[in-house]
Image: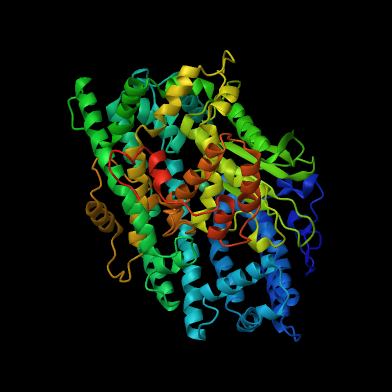
Amino acid sequence: MNQSDPPSGPSDAAGDNPFFQEWTGPFGAPPFGRIAPAHFPPAFDRAFAAHDAEVAAIAADTAAPGFDNTIVALELSGRLLGRVTDVFRALASAHTNPALLEIERDIAPRRARHWDGILHNGRLFGRIDALYREREHHALTAEQQRVLERYHLDFKRAGAALAAPAKARLAAINERLASLGTTFSQNVLADEQAYTLVLESEEDLAGLPDYVRAAARAAAQERGHEHGHVITLSRSSVEPFLQFSARRDLREKAFRAWIARGEGGGATDNRAIIAEMVALRAERSALLGYETFAHYRLDDAMAKTPAAVRGLLDRVWAPARARALADRDELAALAQQQGGNFEFAAFDWRYYAEKLRKLKCDVDEASIKPYLQLNHMIEAAFYTAGKLFGLSFERRTDVPVWHPDVQVWDVHGADGSHRGLFFGDYFARASKRSGAWMTTLRDQEKLAGDIRPLVVNVMNFSKAPDGEATLLSFDDARTLFHEFGHALHGLLSDVTYPMISGTSVQTDFVELPSQLYEHWLERPEILRRFALHYRTGAAMPDDLMARLIAAGTFNQGFATVEYVASALVDLDLHLLADTQGFDVGAFEQTALTRIGMPAEIVMRHRPAHFAHVFSGGGYASAYYSYMWSEVLDADAFAAFEEAQDIFDPATAKRLHDHIYAAGGSRDPAALYDSFRGRLPTPDALLRKRGLLDETGVRS
Ligand SMILES: [Zn+2]
């Protein structure tokens, strides 16, 4: 079945349902203007049924199992479901509403049940297993072998080889986990939507630079306040406030609300959900024959074992903590010097760090930000992709989008051919989940025709009022490059099978293309060209740029500690075999005490709003992935530095062929080795964070 040939079924009352029609608009993109929430329930119904029928036919095939009648048939099945799911996910995360939230609660457990029905289909697994055992006798290409291996592994990891009672229990657990994950993320969204810090008077705005005021005014207007300024719990709203607000009482108020998301008591409290999820994950892993969930999860990761993950995190933790404690003393001393007669607290850290950065590095956010216009940073990301991979980007205004702020570009390859579409959805709004992410509306493949990907980046930048340029912090710009690196992994994908397309790789490898891309932002070659003052158009002065780059390791103790603490708590949570009487609050306290968490730093994501780990669970026991990938990206960028050209064509070609275009076509370690000729050690990472020399930590 292909996308232009939806399954026939009983005639549908909703004859105008776009999911039952061919998408004939530009590039076959989803017709967002015509898609309403009411279209999803019948579309999901029909999609589940159609997929079930297709899979039943594959399982019932009386011919001997071959690659075509089993794997290719599976790869071609479920197209309607894929189409509905991709659009639904995009809307439910980037522009949701009460109707979509309700459908999401209904669909999440049904989707889990649907997939378990397939993964636990004994006849189907019998065919895959037989084919896998006989794989040497089928003349398969390397890519086909990899796809077959992945199918076999996915079925085994889902419990396909287990007895019926165990399968039934697994299915019940998965269904419940899907519901819990959905409720978890909806609770966080509800807490974020419910909170605003309204700044009424000039005194409330003390210390805030113009652009923070402008963003707070725009946030107020979006929420229907005619006057005043509003700080929200979106990172790009609350962090600048914490950096600049001279009002310690208001900083404390905003900070406490920010770190308490998901544990405010009442209907949106996530703590009981976490306890149940941790217990169910442990039970599921035991059914599948693993010691703990972490063992299960990491078995199919580049890291392989909890010990390997802990080894890396511990190695980074000690020097990072030492640095953070020294920084804390310096910040507390500065606060006292400036007349602060109080005990230095977590909500003071960003404020005094900003002041100290100004003193020590002669760099402050307010002097950098006017040079970082959103539109120019988007251009910078495009330009880098042009220099490295020959891509070019042409703005399109005829492609349907889900919100007027969304922009679309047609992406061309070096030979001028169409490579895909890139959708950029950059601004925070109440209907959007917090954070930043890449997703797709269609993946690259060559099985059902030459399918070009539709790739989406979603961010939460504070939007400037109408008619003014949106300015980014350097962190925001880094996030933009990060997500664009993921986007390139989707856009440059050049594989045949959907199973291994684009970002369908291990979680601890998937952050390599994204984090690696951040390196180019920090280079004079890029900043000189694109960091232009929003009023005068002047390039960022060389001395400011030099100070900005030199300040790259400033406050890295703090950043590393808040991240590694989250990763260690995530790991510890999923190393629990006995979850009787589990209390997440007590657990968090114990885990943090054990590692000696500085009292003035709070985890980057506390459990009650740790969406990576509990909304869907893509990063459960895998939040360490960013650091694992950072070991790779720090080493990977060094390949360009060694070539003394950050756009070195030969290095860029290897990077393209073995990383960005390769999807999951081979084992990640093999892919990296093909690019670099060896695997890395953590030294480059420690050096990049400025944590190597003074601590004596060496390989
Ligand atoms: Zn990422």
Q: Position of residue 60 (x, y in %)?
A: 71, 83
* 55 horizontally vs 153: left or right: right
Please tell me how many numbered marks the rendered image carries.
0
Q: Position of residue 468 (x, y in %)?
A: 58, 21
Rendered residue at 61%/47% (across/down): 655
The answer, for residue 272, to whether it is visible in the render is: no
> Picture quarter containing residue 671?
bottom right
> Picture quarter containing residue 583?
bottom left
Rendered residue at 33%/19% (across/down): 203
Look at the image and tell me in which quarter the N terminus lies: bottom right
Up the image or down, 199 lies above or below 665; here it is: above
Give the residue at the far top of this rendering: 536
* 257 horizontally vs 322: left or right: right
Q: Nearer the viewer, residue 510 or 12?
A: 510
Q: Nearer the viewer, residue 53 or 698?
A: 698
Q: Nearer the viewer, residue 544 or 645?
A: 645
* 648 horizontally vs 235: left or right: right
Q: Nearer the viewer, residue 469 or 393?
A: 393
Q: Position of residue 439 (x, y in %)?
A: 60, 50
The answer, for residue 216, to whether it is visible in the render is: yes
Q: Position of residue 427 (x, y in %)?
A: 56, 35
Image colouring: rainbow
Rendered residue at 78%/69% (across/down): 9
* 38 horizontally vs 297: left or right: right
